[in-house]
Image: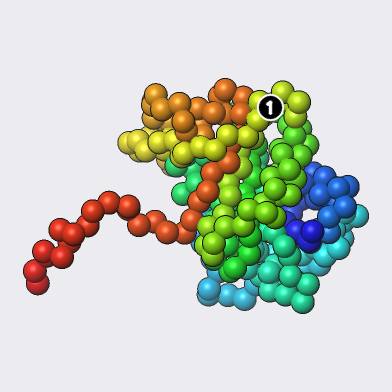
Amino acid sequence: MHVLLTNDDGILAPGIHTLGEVFSAAGHRVSVCAPDRERSAASHSTSLAAPLHAEPRQFEWAENAWAVDGTPVDCASLGLFLTRGDAPDLVIAGVNRGMNYGGAVVYSGTVGAAMEASMCGAQALAVSLCIEKWDEDFDFVPPARAALRVAEWMRGHPLPLGAFYNLNVPVLPYEDIKGIAAARLAPVFLDEPFYVREDGGWRYRGRAREFDDTGTDAAFIRQGYATLTKLTWNCRLDADDAELNGIEL
């Protein structure tokens, strides 16, 4: 299998390197197209006003690698273009340093890159390690191994154009992860704005909403499961909208 890796933490981030090493060791071919610096929370932003520059890089585990002065979405689409003569079987965004479950998917550059790849016609997977304490070092091998298992399973379970898988993995040794649970998005980040004063300005400090639904990704992560959720570009609310036809101009 030929996989194209991208992320929003930058091409030198340990998560993407661990992912590449694990997939290469498993016999898969790896290409990389990732931002030249951290672009976290870039969501689905893309560069339109200026050209992109792709600088070739060399990694032992990669057949091709480019560092791009653009967003994660730019890297996903440009990576697919640069590898068009040898199209990847799968695009993987990650491993992200931080969770991307619940409402975080709206902000995530990792999720945005996977969504862009799926909109370009590729099978795609976003992968995140659900860390909470940012001042510690983390082992990215467990989420990379989980991503490998899901990626190989995905070959027999493709999604339609514009849909992709979102994998979140708890901070546990691989052998201690209870399994992979299909999950709904938790209602986190659905709350009033909250900021604190810092360096003469305002810094966002989001607060998670309390909820009791045990079937969500956040709840499964707390129980020691990895979670897998199907996502899509389609933001339409699945509800009766017949009353919209009654608006008169």
Quadrant of the image containing the N terminus? bottom right
Residue 56 at what x, y percent from top left? 81, 67
Which residue is drawn at the image coordinates 39% and 24% (left, top)?
A: 212
Horizontal side, residue 25 vs residue 3: left or right: right
The answer to whether 8 appears left or right of 67 in the picture is left
- 65 relative position to 47: left or right: right
Vertical side of 10 occupied by 56: above or below: below
Q: Which residue is mark 1?
A: 177
Seen from this angle, which residue lies furthest left? 248
Q: Nearer the viewer, residue 49 or 248?
A: 248
Q: Residue at x 74, y 70 (%)?
A: 87
Q: What residue sits 44% from the left and 35% below the top?
A: 186
Compared with residue 226, is residue 33 higher up or lower down, i.e. above or below?
A: below
Foreground: 14 or 238? 238
All told, the count of numbered labels is 1
Quarter of the image holding residue 77? bottom right
Image quadrant occupied by the C terminus? bottom left
Q: Position of residue 46 (x, y in %)?
A: 54, 66
Tell me the element at label 1.
loop
The answer, for residue 109, to whether it is visible in the render is no
Residue 70 location, x and y as percent?
A: 62, 64
Up-down relation of residue 107 to residue 246 (above or below): above
Decide if residue 122 is in sight here: yes
Res 196 → quadrant: top left
Q: Residue at x 70, y 59 (%)?
A: 90
Amino acid type, mark 1: Ile
Determine whether, in the image, residue 226 is placed left or right of residue 189: right
